[in-house]
Amino acid sequence: MKKIATGTKVSLVFLLLIFCLPLQAAHSRVDWVETGQVKLEEMPIDIAKSQDAEYTFILTEKGHVYIYAKDGSLAGEIPVAPTVNRIAVSSKGDQLYLLSNTNKTLQTINISFIEDINTIGSPFLGTADAQVAVVVFSDFQ
């Protein structure tokens, strides 16, 4: 009688393992690929990404926000107060929010990215080094 009870327990444990292992294996599978790596000169303390994934903002402990483009190139740098310890980006990617627990402040910075446009051989009126603002209207009504 004792051998039958032990055999039944072993069979039940074996059946549980057979039914539970596939469930665990399904949850433990992860497929991943490293898409890039950036060497930072300062210790990072926070990160934010624009909603369109074009830019990544990295806050460092020395008071800089480094902005990296999607291809990993440095797109810009913004000096901030060393007390800033958190950052966030607006949904449109045109504002950067700087939070300081020490000062109990939230600072908003409007940002825009300057793009170089090749105008060699194009006709122009005025000086060649004049600044030009290009405005894109995307909300036609």
Image (spheres, rainbow, N blue to C red):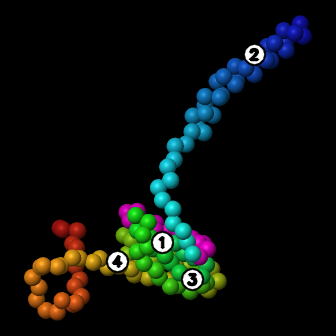
The location of residue 52, given as percent across then percent down, is 37, 63
User: Which element is circle 3 on?
Assistant: loop
How much space separates mark 4 and mark 3, taking CA atoms? 20 Å
State which tag comes first along the sequence, 1 or 4. 1
State which tag comes first along the sequence, 1 or 2. 2
Callout 1 crowding tier (Cα within 10 Å): few <14, some 14–19, many ≥20:
many
Read off the magenta span: 42-57
The location of residue 132, given as percent across then percent down, is 22, 85
State which tag comes first along the sequence, 4 or 3. 3
Q: Say which residue label 1 marks.
A: 57
The location of residue 64, given as percent across then percent down, is 53, 81
Kind of residue at disc 3: Gly
Callout 2 crowding tier (Cα within 10 Å): few <14, some 14–19, many ≥20:
few
Q: Which of 40 and 50 is in front in this view?
A: 40
Direction from residue 34 to residue 8 in the image, left or right: right
How much space separates mark 1 and mark 4, taking CA atoms? 13 Å
Tell me what residue is drawn at x 65 percent, y 29 percent.
21
How much space separates mark 3 and mark 1, taking CA atoms? 13 Å
How much space separates mark 3 and mark 2, taking CA atoms? 63 Å
Q: Looking at the rendered structure, which numbered label has been put on residue 113? A: 4
Q: Say which residue label 2 marks.
A: 11
User: Which element is circle 1 on?
Assistant: strand
Q: The C terminus appears in which quarter of the rendering?
A: bottom left
Of labels 3 and 2, the one closer to you: 3
Callout 3 crowding tier (Cα within 10 Å): few <14, some 14–19, many ≥20:
some
